[in-house]
Image: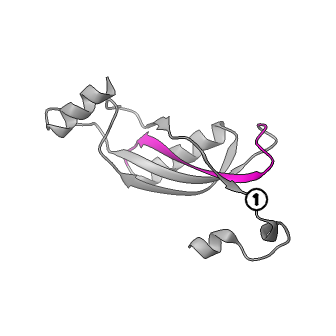
């Protein structure tokens, strides 16, 4: 069904009620909420959201990640063509696979942050 919707949208036969966002979220694994592998400290995933504004999209993605047992650290949203049928209410509709980030020994001892180097 999603392929049919994407075809209608691309051929301009259908229009979405609100923008569709791809939000890339970096999150810290919450070990109290779920059993995560010990060698990983955080994860990165993309969450797809129907939302009116970029702030709303990032907030909904952070909430979706918290439900999965993680605490969102950063969220970066970009508009993208919708791949699912349109929604009239804001909601997160899908999530990609997790990309895990290994635990770094220098971060545990208070060394330079890996996040600062990427920024």
Is 37 situated left or right of 70 in this image? Answer: right
- 75 vs 8: above or below: below
Residue 39 rendering spot, x and y as whole percentages: 78, 51
Taking depth in this image into account, of 39 and 74 the one nearest to the observer is 39
Q: What span is colored magenta in the figure?
A: 34-52
Please identify the quarter of the rendering in which residue 3 is found. top left
Residue at (65% x, 42% y) in the render: 66
Please identify the quarter of the rendering in which residue 35 is found. top right
Residue at (55% x, 52% y) in the render: 25
Residue at (44% x, 54% y) in the render: 77
Q: Mark 1 packing: few (<14 Cα in 10 Å), some, or many (20+)?
A: few
Q: Is residue 43 magenta?
A: yes
Is 78 situated left or right of 15 in this image? Answer: right
Hey, which residue is sitting farthest top in the picture?
1
- 19 vs 86: above or below: below
Residue 90 rendering spot, x and y as whole percentages: 42, 37
Residue at (82% x, 73% y) in the render: 110
- 114 vs 15: above or below: below
Report the quarter where the N terminus lies: top left
Report the quarter where the C terminus lies: bottom right
Q: Is residue 28 magenta?
A: no
Residue 57 rendering spot, x and y as whole percentages: 45, 48
- 38 vs 101: above or below: above
Residue at the spot of label 1: 103
Q: How are the colours assigned in the image?
A: one colour
Residue 102 rendering spot, x and y as whole percentages: 71, 56
Taking depth in this image into account, of 78 and 4 the one nearest to the observer is 4
- Count every numbered label the image shows and give the total: 1
Taking depth in this image into account, of 78 and 105 the one nearest to the observer is 105
**Mark 1 falls on what kind of element?**
loop
Is 7 situated left or right of 90 in this image? Answer: left
């Amino acid at each position: 069904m999603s392929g049919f919707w994407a075809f209608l949208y691309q051929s301009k036969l259908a229009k979405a009620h609100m923008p569709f966002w791809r939000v890339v979220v970096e999150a810290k694994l919450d070990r109290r909420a779920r059993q995560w592998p010990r060698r990983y400290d955080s994860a990165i995933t993309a969450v797809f959201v129907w939302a009116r504004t970029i702030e709303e999209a990032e907030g909904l993605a952070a909430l979706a990640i918290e439900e999965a047992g993680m605490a969102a650290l950063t969220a970066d949203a970009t508009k993208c063509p919708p791949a699912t049928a349109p929604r009239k209410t804001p909601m997160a509709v899908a999530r990609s696979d997790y990309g895990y980030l290994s635990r770094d020994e220098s971060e545990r001892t208070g060394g330079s942050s890996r996040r600062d180097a990427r920024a």
